[in-house]
Amino acid sequence: MSIYAVTAIRKCGTELYNEAQSWARTLDLPYIPRPIHGTLDQLLRDRGLKAVLVATHQGPQVYTEEGILKYHPSMGVPRIRNLKRGGSDHLAQACGFRPGMRVLDCTLGLAADAVVASFLVGPAGKVVGLEASPVLYWAVAQGLQHYEIEDPDITASLRRIEPRLGKAEDLLPAFPADSFDVVYFDPMFRKPVGNSASMQPLRPASYHKPLDAGMIRDALRLAPRVVVKERDEDLLRSLGAREIQGGKYSKLRYGIILREEGDQDGK
């Protein structure tokens, strides 16, 4: 039984109803009509769902027991503004982003990291983002195409990101060898921290499989550089990180794993 489903707002009208039905078919998820009475919380409980994708006149929204998620690029916007003022970015430094690079983000989420990468690699580069949760994928994919920022550089960076639906462990083996210059994982995205109400709905809507050595091997086949974001330096070293970077006043660390010379298989 699916833990996700699609529905629409009440009194949605024929056009929005048909749109929601189309989403359900595309994502291979059940469509559940909204009852005249009852809340979305009741719908989640009655159907045993973790999250429901809701078609609204403002676009897709993800509803979970933690609240409603409307697409926004999270901290990606202030990070880019900081870069434009000449500031630095820890992820950018760890990944070595530069114009023309090909980047694979294996934990797309709200694309906050991906939009920073897209801004730095520019139109000549490429950023592909993998998202395992179908409801989160759809909300983010639509947001990347339609969300507007006053800064045209940020809007253009959002539009260039290529989201793909699927689990990293399934999709990584399907890419040809050396498809990217760097592969990035943020397993911590699956466990939002702090008290940000806008991030809380991510918890039940997300995919929670831990990162393992097999995925690192697959990633090293695709790129000579793999970067993992974590707090636990011992975990980063167990995954093969030879170098660990991070801010002086932050607990977040970026483990850098490099392909051994002549070892394209990442073994």
Image (cartoon, grey):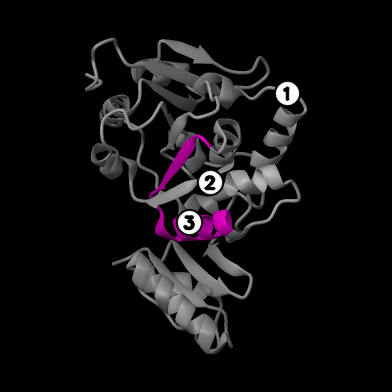
Q: Mark 1 to mark 2: distance in Å?
A: 23 Å
First reached walking from the N terminus: tag 1 or tag 2: 1
- Front residue of 65/249: it is 249
Residue tagged by mark 1? 87
Q: Position of residue 215 (x, y in %)?
A: 30, 32
Label 1 element class: loop
Answer yes or no: do the residues labelled 1 and 2 have beta carbons within 8 Å? no
Asked if the residue at tag 2 contacts the one at tag 3, i.e. Cβ–Cβ closer than 8 Å, the answer is no
Question: Residue 128 in magenta?
Answer: yes
Disc 1 crowd rating (10 Å Cα; few below 14, some 14-19, many 20+) is: few
Q: Circle 2 — which element? A: helix
User: What residue sits right under mark 3 in the picture?
Assistant: 136
Q: Amino acid at mark 3?
A: Leu
Question: For the magenta stretch, what is the residue range?
Answer: 124-145
Task: Tell me the number on the disc at residue 160.
Answer: 2
**Distance between mark 3 and mark 2 Cα atoms:** 18 Å
